[in-house]
Image (cartoon, helix red, strand yellow):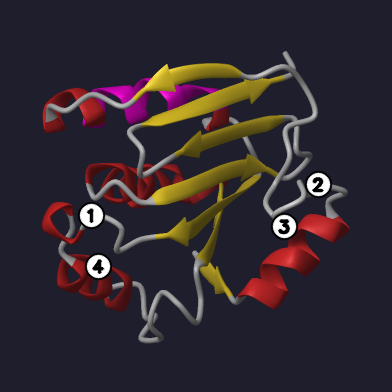
Amino acid sequence: MKTLTKIEIADWCRRNLIPFDEFGRPKSICETEGFKIPIDTGQRVALVKSHFQIFKDEEEILIWFTEWGVWPSSERMHIFDRFRLSYGENRPLIEAPGHVFNQEEVEDALSFITLGVVFLWDCYVVNRTGTKVLFYSHDESGYKSAIK
């Protein structure tokens, strides 16, 4: 895993020709399918696992947390900070909100996304070509898109 600052995230996306929307976030290049994030934590974990299947063969993916702290009672930042520290990252999430994972780190990537969804953080998951995008929102909804 490599962590990225906002500037490094923008560079990664530009290098990989991933377009941005008007808010500076990854823009899907194909039709999206919306979904609701379940209330039950076990169902959230299962949802993330099923969505993540489209990324299992990707060489590299970006996981970008864009908003957190909206629902403080639903999160525990200490867990996330300690989790990142186990990967050698000691900067706060605000300084390095991007995470790039390679093919050998698929399970790690899935764990990062799962924590974000359990905590109801805004999270983008994008492959290196921008043909697959997942978005999870603190509003308990999201969308997915993929060019087959």
Q: Is residue 57 left or right of residue 73?
A: right
Q: How much space separates mark 1 and mark 4, taking CA atoms?
A: 20 Å
Is residue 44 located in the magenta-colored stretch of the structure?
A: no
Residue 52 location, quadrant: top left
Tell me which residue sits at (37%, 42%) in the image.
110
Q: Position of residue 31 (x, y in %)?
A: 72, 17
Tell me which residue sits at (77%, 21%) in the image.
30
* Residue 54 or residue 136, whichever sits in front: 136
Tell me which residue sits at (45%, 43%) in the image.
106
Q: Earlier in the sequence, mark 2 or mark 1?
A: 2
Q: How much space separates mark 2 and mark 4, taking CA atoms?
A: 28 Å
* Residue 58 or residue 114, whichever sits in front: 114
Amino acid type, label 2: Ile
Q: Position of residue 35 (x, y in %)?
A: 43, 18
Residue 18: mark in rendering: 2
Amino acid type, label 3: Gly
Judge whether 82 appears above or below 10 on screen.
Answer: below
Q: Is residue 35 left or right of residue 12?
A: left
Q: How much space separates mark 2 and mark 1, taking CA atoms?
A: 29 Å
Q: Earlier in the sequence, mark 2 or mark 4?
A: 2
Quadrant (top left, top right, bottom left, bottom right) of the C terminus:
top right
Residue occupied by mark 3: 24
Residue 83: mark in rendering: 4
Residue occupied by mark 1: 71
Closer mark to the observer between disc 1 and disc 4: 1
SS category of the residue bearing label 4: helix
